[in-house]
Amino acid sequence: MPATDDNLLGAYLRDRRAKLDPAAFGLPMKRRRTPGLRREEVAQRANVSATWYTWLEQGRGGAPSADVLDRISRAMMLTDVEREHIFLLGLGRPPEVRYHAVEGVTPRLQRILDSLEVSPAFVKTSTWDVVAWNSAAAAVLTDYGALEPKQRNILRLIFGNTRVRSAQSDWESVARFVVAAFRADTARGGATQAVQTLVDELSRSSPEFEQMWRDNDVRAYGDGAKILHHAVAGPLKLEYSAFAVDGRPDLGMVIYNPATPADAVKIRALLKKRSARNSTATKVRQRP
């Protein structure tokens, strides 16, 4: 029985199955009248009955469970996007996010950050580790490159770095916002368990964090405005917006724009000083 127009899940699974290479799954290539994997082979890999899987492709037997769709996605070695697609077709909702530790970003994404000349921007993970940033972010927010990777965490900076704390115009309000948005992000990114060690660490070192965490507030990062008291440039008015990175639910980008032309001038001056300082440091290292 062919998959009908109202059985989009069955049609998609059948198409995916037909495009799979049996050799990649360690299966024999002989005696195959049709391309791809057989239904029985997918069913066996997914630990479901061949009859039930056949019914699923034919649109019979009712809606599958999330567990079954997960097993089928692993059996077919679907990508995260393909896995999300079969959940949307089969259950009308995306799957729960699977947390992945992140090492960095693609060169293309880094070039996007670098193109924002006077707009401090960075990419953070669902555990709020900063994994990429531009020169404006290093000059205005924090010189992340001068920190150990473990310390490039927004919560560690807000609650444990005196310079970052003193730069906030209203530290308590900022800290509460950060904790609430962090809680929401980690849950959305499936990283609640992954951040427990960080939460325990901050609870021990900061009574303020412990109290804010116990409040159980959640907020979206969204967009807004803030004032930073920069040690060199003085007060800086900034507007910020947060963006999702398509295809990477584990990453989010935050961009700060100067709120006025005067603030843009201040950032350009900071960047000029930073460039001159780096140039001098490079010349010193190159001396024989």
Image (tube, rainbow, N blue to C red):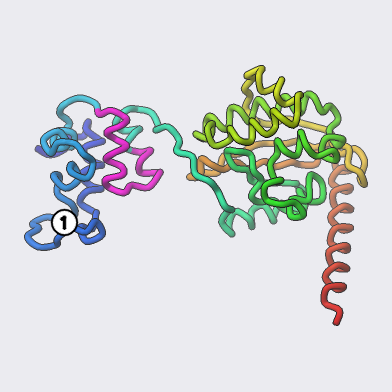
Q: Is the N terminus in the top left, top right, bottom left or bottom right quadrant?
A: top left
Q: Name which residue lies at 75% across and 24% down.
A: 207
**Residue 100 part of the magenta-drawn span:** no
Position of 41 with respect to 164 (left or right) is: left
* Magenta segment, prevailing SS (helix, strand or loop): helix
For the record, the magenta segment spans: 64-85
Is residue 18 depicted above or below 230 in this figure? below
Position of 15 with respect to 106 (left or right) is: left
Is residue 256 depicted above or below 272 in this figure? above
Is residue 124 depicted above or below 25 in this figure? above
Whole-percent x, y for residue 153 in the image: 68, 42
- Image quadrant of residue 175? top right
Q: Which residue is mark 1?
A: 35
Whole-percent x, y for residue 252 in the image: 60, 41
Count the marks: 1
Instruction: Out of 273 and 168, give the one closest to the viewer.
Output: 168
Q: Residue furthest front?
A: 204
- Image quadrant of residue 244? top right
Whole-percent x, y for residue 127 in the image: 60, 38
Q: Residue furthest top?
A: 215
Instruction: Out of 151 and 85, give the one closest to the viewer.
Output: 151
Q: Name which residue lies at 64% across and 43% down.
A: 129
Type of amino acid under label 1? Pro
Q: Name which residue lies at 63% across and 24% down.
A: 219
Q: Could you tell me which secondary element the residue under label 1 belongs to?
A: loop
Q: Is the C terminus in the top left, top right, bottom left or bottom right quadrant?
A: bottom right
